[in-house]
Image (cartoon, grey):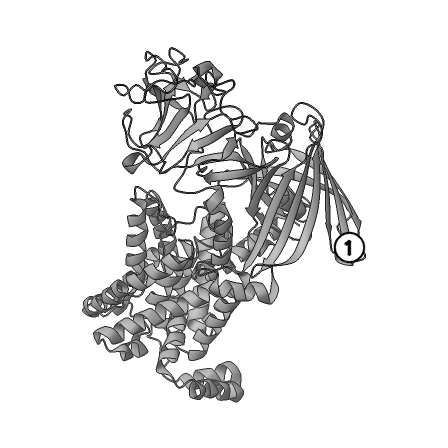
C-alpha cells in the first residue's frame, strides 16, 4: 500500500468516524446509515460532507493528535455545522464558501475547547458546533448573497425526487402505520440530530442504533420516554416537540451519561431519570431566551447537563461502586460494561492500594471483624492473627510461656510501601493470661501510605522493632516481631487499617489485596477481600519463572508455532507460524499484537498478578487462546493453589444470545464465563523446574454449563510457553518462544 493510498484510507476512516461520533460511536455501519440519511436533504448532506472533509484535512495537515483525528473527534462538530448551514440556504458557490469558513472556525474552536475542558478531564461535546452555528445564524440577515432554503416546504416533491412514486408510497405507508404521535416525535427527534425532518430519517437512525448497540438504542428510548412522562406530569404541552423536534437533547443526554461516559447499570439509568427534568426545564427556558434572537438553543441543554454532571463527579472524594466513569473508552457501551463487570473485583475503584498480609507463612485468624471479645463498635474492622499446628493448637507443651506460642517472635511485615509515623518499642511482654490495661495496644507501629490510609500493627515483642519514626519501608519489609505486649493475654498480632495516624484511631473497612485462603490441602487466591474468623491465610510466594516469563517488555518479539488436531476447517486454519510483538498504546497500556492478523491482547502486571484485560481482533486465533489461558496468573503461589475469575462475556458469546443479553445487561447478566486456574504440584516448583498450570474455562447460560475448555500450560526458565487447549474434539497446541533469549 502506497503512502498516498494509506493517507486516503486514513482520511476516509476519520470522515466515517466523524458521523458515528455524533452518537459517541466509532461504528462504520452506523456511520454509513447516518451518511445516507444526511443526504435526504442534499444541501445539508453535501454541506456536512464538505465540512467534515475540511476539518479532517486541517487536523491532518497541521499535525494534530492522530488518535483524535482517526476517532473523528476533530470532525464531528464541523459535520454538524455543515449540516445546519447546508440546510438553511439554497445550494450555491457562496453557500459552500460559507460552509468552508464555518468548518474552519468549528475546527479551531474544537481544538480550543479540547484544551480548556480537557484540563478538567471533561469532553468538549458539541460546544464548538453551538458557537459556530449561532455565529452563522446571527449573521444570516447580512448574508444577502445567500438565498434561504425552501426545502422542507414541499416534502413529497423532495421525496419523489429521491426515489420516485414507490418512495412516496412507502413514506405514506409509514406515516399511516404509526398512529402514535409519541412514536413519531421520537423518530423525528432522532432525525433532527442530523437536521432531517423526515420520519424515515429517524427510523433509519433508530435501526442503525439497534444494530450498533442495544444499550444505546434502549437509552435513546429511555431518555425520550422519561422526558415525555415529565412533560405530562407537570402539564407542559408535549406537542411543541412536533414543531421543534428539540427532544434530541433528552436522547443524547441519556446515551452520553447512561452508557458512554459512565458504566451502564441500574444506577446510571436511575440518574438519567433524575436529570431529565433539568434538561426539560433548561430546554424550555433557553427556547424562550433564544427566541428573542430568532435562533435555536439546539443541543445547549444536553451540553449543559452532561458537563455539569461529569464535572461534579470529578470533585467526589470517594467513588461509589455503581457510578463509575469509564477509565478507557472502548467506544461501545456493551464493551465498557462487560469489561468493567469483570474488572470491578480485579481493580476496585474504592481500594486503589493492594495491601499484603503482614507476615510470612500460614497464619490463622482467631478474631476477625465484629469480634467476640474486642473489635467492636468503631474498632470493629480489625484482625487478630496467630499460628496453629495441624491439630489447631497455637502452642507447644502446656502453653505456659510466651516462647511456647508458635507466633511469638515471628517476623511482622509492612503491608504496603509507606512511612513509619509511630513506633513504640519499650513495653514489656506479658506473662501468659496477664494483660497490661495501662498500655492497651502494647508495642505498636503505624505505617502511613497516604493521607487517607494507614496500617496499625500492635502487641509486638519488646524491643523487637527494626524501624523508627520517619523511616520509609517497602511492602513486605520486616518491621518487628510478634509479641505479647499491651492488652494481650497470649501472643498474637493485632492488625487494622485506619484513616488517621493515631494509635487509638478507629478502624476502616479496607480489604487485603491478594492473599491465599487455605481450603483443605489447596489454596484459593482471594483478591480485595476480608478474611474471616477461623480462616488460615498466607501470602503468595513469588516465583522467578513466572516473574520472568510474564514480564512482557515493549519491543519484545515472540515466535509462535501452532499445531491443530481437529476435523473442523475453522480450527485447522490456525496451524502455522506467527510472530507476536509487545507494544504500548497512547494510554501507555501494554499489549501483545499478532503481526499476521493484528489481533491485540491487552495486559497489566502489578508485580503480584498478571492480568489480560481486553482482546481485540479475531477470536479464532492463537493469540486469543493465550489471552484466555493466561487471563489471570499470580506471580507467586503455593502448590495446588487455585485462582478464579470471570472473562468478559462478549469474548466468547455471540449471536442471538449476546444480542438479547445486551438489552438487559445493565440490569442483570444471564451469560457468564468462569475462569479457574490451578497451580500443579510438580516437585519443588518454587526453586527449580517448570511451572505447570491447568486452566478450565466454562460457558454458562442462566447458571447452566453449556461448554467447557480444558487448557494445560507449562512455562520453563527460558521463558518458553507450551499451551494445550482441548474442547469439542479439537486440540490446539501453541508454543511461544521469546526471540530475545
| Residue at 34% in and 59% down | 129
Residue 502 x, y percent position in the rendering: 27, 25
Residue 290 placement (x, y as % from top left): 22, 67
Does residue 736 appear to the left or right of 547 in the view shown?
right
Residue 177 seen from this side:
yes
- Sort mark 1 into few (<14), some (14-19) or many (20+) by Cα contacts within 10 Å: few
Let me know if residue 606 appears in the view: no
Residue ID at (58%, 65%): 657
Specify the farthest residue to the front. 398
Q: Is residue 496 above or below residue 335?
A: above
228 horizontally vs 540: left or right: left
- Secondary structure of the residue carrying tag 1 is loop
The percent coordinates of residue 107 (x first, y second) are 39, 53
- The x, y position of residue 175, in whole percent, is 43, 85
Above or below: residue 399 compared with residue 608: above
Name the image quarter holding the C terminus. top right
Total numbered badges shown on the rendered structure: 1
Q: Is residue 443 left or right of residue 623?
A: left
Disc 1: which residue:
729
**Residue at the (28%, 61%) spot, across then down:** 135
Amino acid at each position: 500500500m502506497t503512502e498516498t493510498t494509506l493517507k486516503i484510507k486514513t482520511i476516509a476512516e476519520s470522515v466515517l468516524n466523524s458521523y458515528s461520533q455524533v452518537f459517541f460511536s466509532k461504528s462504520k455501519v452506523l456511520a454509513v446509515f447516518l451518511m445516507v440519511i444526511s443526504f435526504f436533504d442534499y444541501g445539508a448532506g453535501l454541506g456536512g460532507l464538505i465540512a467534515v472533509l475540511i476539518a479532517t484535512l486541517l487536523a491532518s495537515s497541521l499535525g494534530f493528535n492522530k488518535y483524535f483525528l482517526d476517532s473523528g473527534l476533530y470532525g464531528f462538530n464541523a459535520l454538524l455545522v455543515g449540516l445546519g448551514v447546508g440546510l438553511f440556504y439554497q445550494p450555491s458557490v457562496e453557500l459552500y464558501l460559507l460552509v468552508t469558513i464555518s468548518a474552519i472556525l468549528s475546527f479551531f474552536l474544537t481544538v480550543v475547547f479540547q484544551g480548556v475542558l480537557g484540563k478538567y478531564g471533561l469532553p468538549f461535546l458539541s460546544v464548538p458546533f453551538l458557537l459556530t452555528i449561532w455565529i452563522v445564524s446571527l449573521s444570516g440577515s447580512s448574508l444577502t448573497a445567500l438565498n434561504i432554503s425552501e426545502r422542507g416546504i414541499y416534502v413529497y416533491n423532495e421525496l419523489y425526487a429521491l426515489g420516485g412514486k414507490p418512495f412516496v408510497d412507502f413514506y405514506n405507508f409509514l406515516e399511516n402505520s404509526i398512529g402514535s404521535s409519541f412514536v413519531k416525535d421520537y423518530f423525528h427527534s432522532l432525525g433532527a440530530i442530523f437536521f432531517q425532518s423526515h420520519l424515515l430519517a429517524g427510523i433509519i437512525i433508530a435501526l442503525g442504533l439497534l444494530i450498533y448497540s442495544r444499550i444505546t438504542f434502549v437509552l435513546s428510548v429511555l431518555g425520550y420516554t422519561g422526558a415525555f412522562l415529565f412533560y405530562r406530569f407537570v402539564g407542559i404541552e408535549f406537542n411543541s416537540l412536533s414543531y421543534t423536534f428539540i427532544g434530541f437533547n433528552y436522547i443524547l443526554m441519556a446515551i452520553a451519561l447512561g452508557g458512554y461516559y459512565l458504566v451502564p447499570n441500574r444506577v446510571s439509568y436511575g440518574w438519567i431519570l433524575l436529570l431529565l427534568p433539568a434538561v426539560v426545564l433548561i430546554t424550555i427556558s433557553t427556547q424562550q431566551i433564544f427566541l428573542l434572537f430568532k435562533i435555536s438553543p439546539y443541543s445547549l441543554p444536553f451540553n449543559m447537563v452532561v458537563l455539569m454532571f461529569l464535572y461534579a463527579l470529578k470533585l467526589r472524594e470517594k467513588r461509589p461502586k455503581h457510578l463509575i466513569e469509564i477509565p478507557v473508552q472502548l467506544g461501545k457501551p456493551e464493551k465498557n460494561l462487560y469489561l468493567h463487570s469483570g474488572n470491578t473485583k480485579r481493580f476496585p475503584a474504592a481500594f486503589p492500594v493492594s495491601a499484603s498480609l503482614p507476615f510470612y507463612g500460614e497464619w490463622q485468624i482467631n478474631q476477625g471483624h465484629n469480634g467476640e471479645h474486642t473489635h467492636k463498635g468503631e474498632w470493629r474492622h480489625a484482625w487478630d492473627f496467630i499460628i496453629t499446628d495441624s491439630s489447631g493448637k497455637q502452642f507447644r507443651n502446656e502453653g505456659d510461656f510466651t516462647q511456647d506460642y508458635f507466633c511469638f517472635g515471628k517476623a511482622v511485615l509492612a503491608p504496603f510501601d509507606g512511612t513509619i509515623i509511630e513506633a513504640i518499642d519499650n513495653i514489656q511482654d506479658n506473662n501468659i493470661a496477664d494483660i497490661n490495661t495501662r498500655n492497651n495496644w502494647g508495642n505498636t507501629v503505624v505505617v502511613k501510605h497516604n493521607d487517607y490510609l494507614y496500617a496499625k500493627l500492635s502487641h509486638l515483642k519488646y524491643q523487637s522493632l527494626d524501624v523508627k519514626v520517619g523511616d520509609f519501608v517497602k511492602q513486605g519489609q520486616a518491621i518487628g516481631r510478634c509479641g505479647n505486649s499491651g492488652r494481650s493475654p497470649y501472643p498474637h498480632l493485632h492488625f487494622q487499617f485506619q484513616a488517621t495516624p493515631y494509635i487509638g484511631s478507629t478502624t476502616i473497612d479496607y480489604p487485603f489485596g491478594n492473599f491465599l485462603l487455605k481450603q483443605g490441602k489447596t489454596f484459593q487466591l482471594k483478591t480485595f477481600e476480608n478474611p474471616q474468623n477461623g480462616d488460615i491465610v498466607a501470602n503468595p510466594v513469588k516465583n522467578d519463572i513466572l516473574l520472568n516469563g510474564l514480564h512482557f517488555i515493549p519491543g519484545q518479539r515472540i515466535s509462535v508455532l501452532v499445531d491443530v488436531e481437529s476435523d473442523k476447517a475453522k480450527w485447522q486454519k490456525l496451524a502455522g507460524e506467527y510472530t507476536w510483538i509487545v507494544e504500548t498504546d497512547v494510554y501507555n497500556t501494554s499489549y501483545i499484537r499478532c503481526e499476521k492478523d493484528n489481533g491485540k491482547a491487552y495486559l497489566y502486571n502489578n508485580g503480584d498478578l498478571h492480568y489480560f484485560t481486553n482482546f481485540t481482533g479475531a477470536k479464532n486465533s492463537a493469540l486469543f487462546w493465550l489471552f484466555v489461558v493466561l487471563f489471570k496468573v499470580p506471580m507467586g503461589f503455593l502448590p495446588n493453589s487455585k485462582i478464579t475469575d470471570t472473562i468478559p462475556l462478549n469474548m466468547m458469546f455471540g449471536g442471538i444470545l449476546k444480542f438479547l443479553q445486551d438489552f438487559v445487561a445493565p440490569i442483570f447478566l444471564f451469560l457468564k464465563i468462569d475462569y479457574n486456574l490451578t497451580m500443579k504440584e510438580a516437585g519443588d516448583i518454587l526453586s527449580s523446574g517448570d511451572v505447570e498450570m491447568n486452566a478450565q474455562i466454562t460457558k454458562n447460560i442462566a447458571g447452566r454449563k453449556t461448554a467447557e475448555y480444558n487448557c494445560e500450560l507449562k512455562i520453563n526458565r527460558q521463558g518458553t510457553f507450551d499451551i494445550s487447549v482441548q474442547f469439542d474434539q479439537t486440540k490446539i497446541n501453541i508454543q511461544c518462544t521469546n526471540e530475545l533469549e
